[in-house]
Amino acid sequence: MPTTIRPPAAPPGSTVAVVATSSPVGSDDLDRLVGYLRGRGYEVRTYPSCRATTGYLAGPAEQRAADLNAAFTDPDVRLIVPATGGKGAAQLLPLLDYDAIAANPTILTGMSDPSILLNAIHARTGLLTLHGPSGYDFFQRPVHDETATAFFDAITSGLTGREVPGKDWKIVRGAGTTVRGPVVGGHLGTIRALVGTDYLPDLDGAALILEDVFVGWVDIDAALTHLRLAGVFDRIAALVVGVPVDTSQGDAPDPTWDDLIVRCVGGKFPVITNVEFGHTHRKIPLPIGGVIELHLDDNSPVLRYRDDLIEAR
């Protein structure tokens, strides 16, 4: 496994690179994103992919990968933000310069489709990445205050020592225990594509995070069953499932969402659901590769960050 690499902090005054890794971003949305980041005190550079459209993609994979490579190797850039999600980030994986990325550690944030990049880059380089907001979250009106505050705190001051209370979380299995592990995962439909490749981070003892949006329970069943058959759930320390957003039960045989999850994943590891890190307005920042600790008290579950996202100053 590569040695863990922590990127430098990204305080106001530093430069943010905005790239389109997946689907196109509208010009008005891009302008609002740039304006928001500048309003937070950052210099902003946009790359050609942000203005490109090729069907459902923000230009050819070669251009999107070139932009991401260029953002990592720009000595001024401290933070890289995908403009939005969508489809197509997986196409970039064989086109990225992982040696250059490792030599130029930079904070990369994102979720949904770009979550595949967070995991692949960590797997190949050891660089800690951040499952958190993408440009989409910052060109919305209004921007969610808690999400923005937690994100900018993470990239400027770090995460170690912080706690997140889980008052709305559901401890489906493992109540009364404490579990610790490095974070792996993200968008279920996207992360699933990493199974069987050398772009999937080490799962041994991991806190696996999974969430999805706009899919039926039958699709969740198929994806989780695939992961179980591939042995993914044989290796993890805990499963953390995001709040279900725009999902449809259809004629699934399970009476509840939690029943569906437990039936599909099997095993005996702790399972926590209804955690706000995915396609919800509030997003808890989670460091891909960074260690978290989950205290699964029935009445007051808590997440503690045990490993920092950024290098010590």
Image (cartoon, helix red, strand yellow):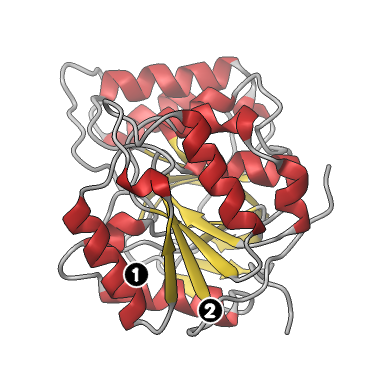
Task: Decide which of tag 2 and tag 1 comes sooner along the chain.
Answer: 2
At x 43%, y 29%, the residue is: 60
Give the number of callouts. Answer: 2
Residue drawn at x 34%, y 31% is 57
Quarter of the image with the C terminus in it: bottom right
Decide: is 118 above or below 146: above
Q: Give me the disc on residue 147.
A: 1
Q: Is residue 126 visible?
A: no
- 61 w.r.t. 33: above or below: above
The residue at the point 43 percent across, 79 percent down is 42
Q: Nearer the viewer, residue 12 or 64?
A: 64
Query: What separation in Å lies between label 2 and label 1 (alpha carbons)?
Result: 20 Å
Q: Which dot, 2 or 1, sits closer to the camera?
A: 2
Confirm or deny contact between disc 2 and disc 1 (CB under 8 A). Answer: no
Residue at 47 percent across and 39 percent down: it is: 64
Rendered location of residue 171, percent (x, y)? 43, 51
Could you tell whether 271 is left or right of 238 in the image? Answer: left
Amino acid on which disc 2 is placed: Ser
Residue 212 picture location, percent across and down = 34, 37
Callout 1: helix, strand or loop? helix
Image vertical order of residue 222 relative to residue 63, above or below: above
What is the number of the mark on residue 155? Answer: none
Q: Which residue in the structure is indicated by mark 2?
A: 14
Give the amino acid type for the residue marked by disc 1 in the picture.
Thr
